[in-house]
Amino acid sequence: MSQVILTESQGRVGLIRIHRPEAMNALNDAVMDGLSAALDQFEANPDIACVVLTGIEKAFAAGADIAAMRNLDFAQAYSSDFISRNWERLLTFRKPVIAAVSGYALGGGCELAMMCDMVFAAENARFGQPEIKIGTLPGAGGTQRLPRAVGKALAMDLCMTGRFMDAQEALRAGLVSRVLPADKLLEEALAVAQAISNQSLPALMMLKESVNRAYESPLSEGLKFERRMLHASFSLQDQKEGMNAFVEKRTPNFTHK
Ligand code: HXC
């Protein structure tokens, strides 16, 4: 595992830290390959049920590494499948992921946060898609996920001006679900992840797939998918345990089956 990605486990929670402080956590191949490998590891581990992805205090990630990509030409970008090759592992990761964002989440950093299932922001967090200021445009979902998260007008405003949005504006806009004091961010994200990880893992995975369907399909299709997932959940031992525990007024003991 590369040193720019640090991992640890805490109970059923996997913690992934992006650690490239000398470059504001700019996302180069070492970071993205390391992140993919860390996700592979946590996906394969049945004892991990939820992941927290975080950065350093000053930056979740200040974007794709500008120095590393500035001389790319079309042929190189296309042939090497730039971005697609190693940026999309989060999209296929099936367990819940919380982004804990402190400092800058810009460009590819903001796009990475938006690939997570929920985003918690420290009060010092700054979100933005400033690619226009360096003569290009968002390329890892910024023009697609940002309007879905915050609406077209604000997405256009952020992408066209390149301005940064603070944590409170991100909360109002619906990009983040919680704003926390910087020194409580990781503690809170880990506590929420721990609570989530005590739920039934297969039910969580079905839930994640269903919410993601809402993004990808018309309402009627999404509703059909949700209904089938609900039906399928009745085959889980955890569904029987959860409902029996409620009726018997006790805490459920999920076995993740
Ligand atoms: C490479 C970066 C970087 C980046 C910061 N650094 N962001 N290196 N790529 N995206 C480096 C700086 O060059 C500097 O290195 C060090 O990190 C500290 O940054 P400073 O600029 O000195 O810090 P500060 O003045 O506090 O400003 C912080 C900042 C600024 C506001 C985050 O660094 C900035 O604007 N960064 C670029 C943000 C950006 O444009 N992101 C979008 C990238 S394009 P040295 O060696 O000088 O100390 C993108 C495209 C996505 O993401 C498309 C598909 C993925």
Image: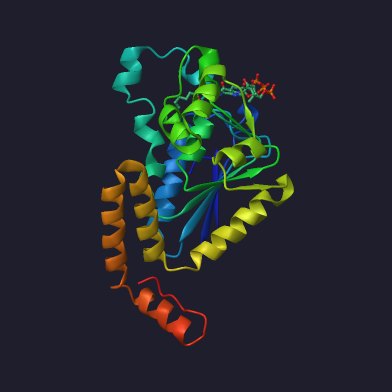
Quarter of the rendered structure image containing ligand 1: top right
Residue that appears at 29% across and 43% down: 218
Query: Is residue 98 found left or right of 95 in the rendered image?
Result: right
User: Hey, which quadrant is residue 79 in on the image?
Assistant: top left
Quarter of the picture containing the C terminus is: bottom left
Q: In this view, does 135 lie above or below 192?
A: above
Q: Can residue 14 be seen in this view?
A: yes
137, above or below 11, in the image: above
* Residue in front for this viewpoint, 32 or 121: 121
Q: Judge from the rendering whether residue 170 lies leftward or rightward of residue 37; answer left or right.
A: right
For the point 39% across and 49% down, the residue is 40
Q: Residue 240 appears in which quarter of the rendering? A: bottom left
In the displayed image of the protein, which residue is found farthest to the bottom? 248
What is the tally of numbered marks visible in this picture? 0
Residue 249 picture location, percent across and down: 51, 85
Measuring from the top left, give residue 70's x and y in whole percent. Answer: 48, 14
Please say whether residue 107 is visible from this viewpoint. no
Point out residue 160 in the picture as x, y percentages from the top left corner.
52, 18
Q: Residue at x 57, y 38 (%)?
A: 173
Q: How is the image coloured?
A: rainbow
Q: As rendered, which of 35 and 101 lies closer to the eye?
A: 101
Q: Which residue is depicted at the point 31% across and 14% down?
A: 75
Nearer-the-camera pick, 124 or 64:
124
Residue 159, given in percent of the width and then of the height, sits at 51, 22
Whether residue 182 sits left or right of residue 13 in the image: it is right
Query: Relative to 154, does residue 207 appear above or below in the rendering?
Result: below
